Amino acid sequence: MSKRNFAGTMILTGLALILVGCTDEKPPSIQDEARRRDAALVAIVQCFIDRGAIPAAEVKSQPWLQNGKVLPSAELLTWANGHEETVYHGKTLIGWEDEATAAWPNWKCPL
């Protein structure tokens, strides 16, 4: 590569980096990501309970399940951590959670 091409490439690269830094889009904050993930987890577990993918007997005494509704709580997160590798309809719970979080708030129960 000639010095002129190299210099031109460096200038264009520098301009591109400056333009990338000028965008108004900010990456989601850790708090926003955590809220999306929590909401997605509640929706997934609710979907699985409603469709019978999680046996009612398994969760009937859980404090995060009130009158058939899944409530966000530390206990739900503890339960999910213990079941993250459990396979539901061909995918692990953590896989479902990743998928739903990426699509949130547009994720819909596919069962």
Image (spheres, rainbow, N blue to C red):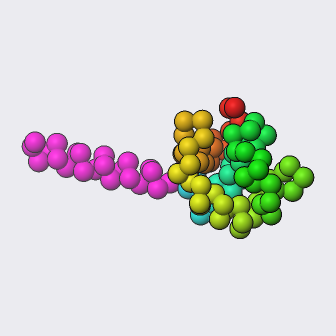
Task: Identify which residue is drawn at 10% across, 42% down.
Answer: 1
Q: Can residue 66 be seen in the rendering of this structure?
A: yes
Q: Report x, y in % for residue 59.
A: 75, 54
**Residue at far front of view:** 57
Q: Can residue 29 be seen in the rendering of this structure?
A: no
Main secondary-structure element of the magenta-colored stretch = helix
Q: Report x, y in % for residue 62.
A: 77, 60
Q: How many badges with numbers are in the image?
A: 0
In front of the other: 32 or 17: 32
Task: Identify which residue is drawn at 71% across, 61% down.
Answer: 76
The segment highlighted magenta reads 1-24
Residue 3 painted magenta = yes
In front of the other: 22 or 75: 75
Task: Report the quarter where the C terminus lies.
Answer: top right
Task: Identify which residue is drawn at 68% across, 49% down.
Answer: 40
**Residue at far left of view:** 2
Q: Report x, y in % for residue 38.
A: 68, 57
Q: Which quarter of the picture shows residue 8? A: top left
Residue 34 painted magenta = no
Q: Report x, y in % for residue 20.
A: 45, 51
